Image (cartoon, coloured by chain):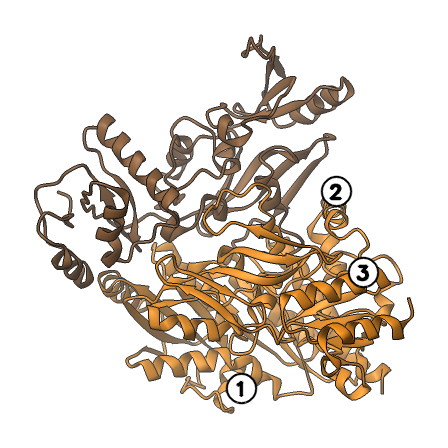
Chain colours: A orange, B brown
Amino acid sequence: MSAESWKAQLREIVGKDYLLDTPAALLAYESDALTLFRCKPSAVLLPENADQVAACVAVLHAAKVPFAARGAGTGLSGGALVAEGGVVIAMTRLKKIHALDAERRIAIVDPGVVNLDLSRAAEKFGLRYAPDPASQSVSTLGGNMAENAGGPMCFLHGTTANHVLAADVVLPDGRCETWGEVHDHAQDLDLRGFLCGSEGTVAIAVRLYLKLVPVPEKVVTMMAAFHSIAEACSAVSAIVAAGLRPVALEVMDQATINAVENSVYRAGLPTDAGAVLIIEVEGPSTTVEHDVPQMEALLDNFDLLRLERAETPEQRLAVWKGRKGAGGALGRLAPDSYVMDGVVPRSKLTEIMDYVGEVQTEAGLPVANLFHAGDGNIHPHFSYDARDPEQAAAVENAGAKILRRCLELGGSISGEHGIGLEKQHMMAEQFGAEEIALMERLRRVFNPTDLMNPGRGLPMGSGCAEAFHRHGRIQNG
Amino acid sequence: MVEQHSSVDAAAQTKLVHADSVEDAPKLLREAHAAGQAVLPCGKRSRQARIAPTAKADCWLSLARCDRLLWLDAEDQTCEVQAGMSMASLQQHLQGTGLELALMCRGAETGTLGGLFLSAEPSLLASSCGPSRDFVLGGGWILANGTAVRSGARVVKSVAGYDVTRLLLGSRGQLAINTSLILRLRPAPRELHYYSVEAASWPELRNQLAPARLLFPSEENGNMLLQFANLKVQHAALEPVDFELAEQQRVAFVGQMTTQLPTPSPWLEATAEACAPGAPHFGRRP
């Protein structure tokens, strides 16, 4: 089937205005938030509903054209890029909240609904959607599910996979199924669980059935300022060891604090601190009122610069605006950013942070650290210029070194960003040949033609990587 | 060493084979494969009706004797246990750590943890702590061809590769034999508060509990809770069955409680006030 022929069929399905194929229109879809990889698709589809998605997939399957679903493009591992000649299916027009069942605490939504919009809609029922990636004001729930996104609150509430009850999906040949059960956790095969974090390689979700949680009776947010990041990490260990269960334990180092305080996300953080620890406690008043003083007493054992409570909702919002805007604030420091994602047992946080410092010195590039300390999930943030091949190579090498150390410390190469294109080469370092062979066999079961988001998440065959332009600004001028 | 027992199911002529170590299992599977025999993995078979109610096999392969704690990282609140370990045994290992596996499942005292997770046994704490499988971070498996593989990671958060753990747990032993489980633990509740609730029927109970913002994921699960409660009440002399009401507080169904004690939370007080005379009592258990 010629390209003109399948494009004509696709136009027929989505309408002529919703198939984009001009160079200018395609530009926005050539990378996600990881700009290290770029590839211009041959077309972008903007279907309006699930039926259109299924029909488009059926056409692409018949025409043997590779395709990838994409949400808001905020992914940080290159998971929503499609190889040269492929088609991006942008899900952003599927953005309806179909139902909010307050009694059963279930939301039925389109995959293009923005994460934060769901919590805002559920608020009037005293409910919210718990997973809260930093991108939650723009990232979509479908994208969150594809990458099994986390966020600060995941320390207590778990990641996206813990909150997806079921999904209506389009299979790689265009057939539709429902995976999961809203009422039954004891699912045979648990395809819903397998779908979460599968990076769009086994099915495209076109409707999600999500769990909502109650808005807590009381919330207290604290900010502790330390001389060093090591002290902040020690405090995290002490809080956890005391059996306290805050909802979030977030650390930001001095570089991050300075970037935040010099940006529109300014939160009044102490710029003289080596690191700050944001602690949020939520729950019934009795629990919070018991835990917070205990936590403050425990923090008093450290040589703190400051310990403050956010006394008003406005102060709390300011703290979180600073934390969640930190990525954006750091993005202003250089033409390009590389936000790493690795996990260590939380008892190894100090060790991995020391190592990040060593790697930073070696690479000669600025690194800022902001991370989900409660989960041991680190996010070193490199600021660099991709036009300089040496800088780009240094960033990649530094990233690989840090991830290898995460593995040596008993961790993982990704806590919430996914593997995408970025970390395929590292998969064989976390998993053995038999484990990777098993994952490949599973992918072939669901996606036998490998047209749905090909070459993502698992190590690619030799030569496939060249389909994507690394450091695109250099190669594409 | 593999110990073979005589048939345990005379009607089906099914042989029960115990693996004395995880290393035995691949060999047994390869032998069965070569002989064209169907193998059904099991622990103590206490949940077999739930795991594989209609499955037919030539041989049961039990890993109940593989019951060791492989490691416990109290600081990171994780551990790995062999699939044959019982909940009671895990609780013994956790004594003094201040940690617990936040599950409350039927038959936890008798069966193996492998069976508990493979069967996705409903947990009475699921409404606030999540379903049982959410506590499994990874594990060890043996595929049908005898290949040993591992899934997941020993950290509380990992999205590297497919979530093979959930798929294999969900296959209930039909895609792979579970040999070990990496589990997410949590600090044990500081204190427990018990509340009595009495109702004539499920809908009535549900209505009575609605102001307390408790969640019953489904009527089916709710019925399970009630049946469970009745069972315990009947057999354990009013020993309460509890499920988590909110963080570090628990509510219990106990048959009848006559003393209403002070409530520890303003919203519980409000709830108690909202209950009409004769309706369920919310109170602290002595």
Q: Chain of mark 1?
A: A
Res. A396 image quadrant: bottom right
Write down the residue under mark 1.
A259
Q: CA distance from mark 2 to mark 3?
A: 30 Å
Q: Chain of mark 3?
A: A
Q: Which residue shows up at 44% across the image and 28% down it? A: B111
Q: Secondary structure at mark 3?
A: helix
Please give the label number shown on residue A61.
Answer: 3
In primary-sequence order, the first of circles 2 and 3 is 3
Q: Are marks 1 and 3 on the same chain?
A: yes
Q: Which residue shows up at 37% across the image and 60% down it? A: A239
Q: Crowding near pointer 1: few (<14 within 10 Å), some, many (20+)? A: many
Q: Crowding near pointer 2: few (<14 within 10 Å), some, many (20+)? A: few
Measured as percent of width and height from the top left, residue B96 is found at: 34, 41
Q: Chain of mark 2?
A: A
Pick the residue in front: A28 or A67: A67
Left or right of B219 on screen, residue B272: left
Q: Secondary structure at mark 2?
A: helix
Please give the label number shown on residue B251.
Answer: none
Res. A356 image quadrant: bottom right
Q: Secondary structure at mark 1?
A: helix
Q: Amino acid at mark 1?
A: Ala
Viewport quadrant of the C terminus of chain A:
bottom right
Write down the residue under mark 2.
A434
Viewport quadrant of the N terminus of chain A:
bottom right
